[in-house]
Structures are given as C-alpha cells and as structure tokens.
Image (tube, rainbow, N blue to C red):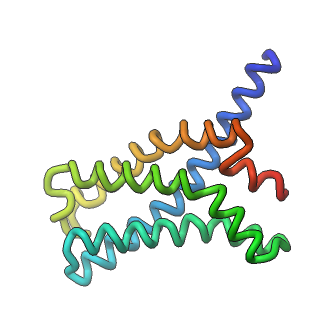
Amino acid sequence: MTAHAHAGASLNRVAFSATAHCLTGCAIGEVLGLVIATALGWGNAASIALAIVLAFVFGYGLTLRPLVFGGVALGTALGLALAADTLSIVVMEIVDNAVVLLVPGAMDASITDALFWGSLAFALAVAFAAAFPVNRWLISRGRGHAVIHHTH
C-alpha cells in the first residue's frame, strides 16, 4: 500500500469513527426525544425540537465525558466538543429530520409501530451517509474530531 493510499485509509477510518460517534449521540437524543414527546402526546414541531436538543446534548456529552475524565478542564473540553461535533451534528440532524418528515406517516406513527422505528433507523442511516464526507473533510483539514485526537 502506498503512503497516500494508507493515509486515505486511515483518514477514512478516523472519519468513520467520528461519524459513528456522532451517530451514537444523535441516535440516543433522537430516540429519547421522540419517545418522550410521543408518550406526552406532543405535536410534530415540539417532538422534533426536543429530539434535536437532546441529540446535541448527547452528542456533545459523549465527547465531553472522556475529555473531562482524562483531565481536560471543563471549559477547554467544551470548546473542543463544540469544535469537534457541531458541524457533524448539524448535518446529521438536518438530514435525519428531513428524511423522517418525508416518510409518509412516520411523524404520526406511535412508538409501538414498526413505521416509527423503521423510518428512524432509515433516517439515521441516511444521516450517517451525509455526515461521513463532512467529517472526512473536516478531519483532513485538522478540524472536527482531529482536534480531539490532538488532546490524547
């Protein structure tokens, strides 16, 4: 394998890992937000808003926790989390919510309905595909999760 090919493969691995990390936080927030909002009988706008807020909370939280436990000051860790995750979460949330809104009946499905879970899983998969090149581009320029790797 050439040095260029190895660097590309390594970049793809780091970008995949960063995107999977983002997906984990977004998925936790989305599922929890939609389950809570559905259980409370909230409308679509409130459901989406809660899911987005929780996606950011969990996305940033998954980055903050190891940094803070690793000895990074909270203020520094927060700055790193914001730099590492914001664009990825924004892309993932825009795509995820757009896909769910486009699936007929998905926003009206209950949490016991296969359409609810199927549309959410599909939307998150599409969001992963959209966020991967964003993370790859950021990391290749020393941004995104690359700033986190410099702290380890």
- On screen, residue 61 versus residue 105, left or right, reads right
**Residue in the image at 45% along x and 41% along y:** 130
| Residue 26: image location, x then y, percent | 48, 61
Disc count in the image?
0
Q: Considering the image in quadrants, where does the C terminus appear?
A: bottom right
**Residue in the image at 85% along x and 73% along y:** 71
- On screen, residue 44 versus residue 121, left or right, reads left
| Res 54 quadrant in image | bottom left
Is 96 situated above or below 77?
A: above
| Residue 124: image location, x then y, percent | 40, 51
Q: Residue furthest top?
A: 2
| Res 6 quadrant in image | top right
**Residue in the image at 66% along x and 63% along y:** 81
Q: Considering the image in quadrants, where does the N terminus appear?
A: top right
Is 122 situated above or below 73?
A: above
- On screen, residue 63 versus residue 30, left or right, reads right
| Residue 33: image location, x then y, percent | 37, 73
| Res 61 quadrant in image | bottom right
Front-lying residue, 140 or 113: 140
Is 111 situated above or below 136?
A: below
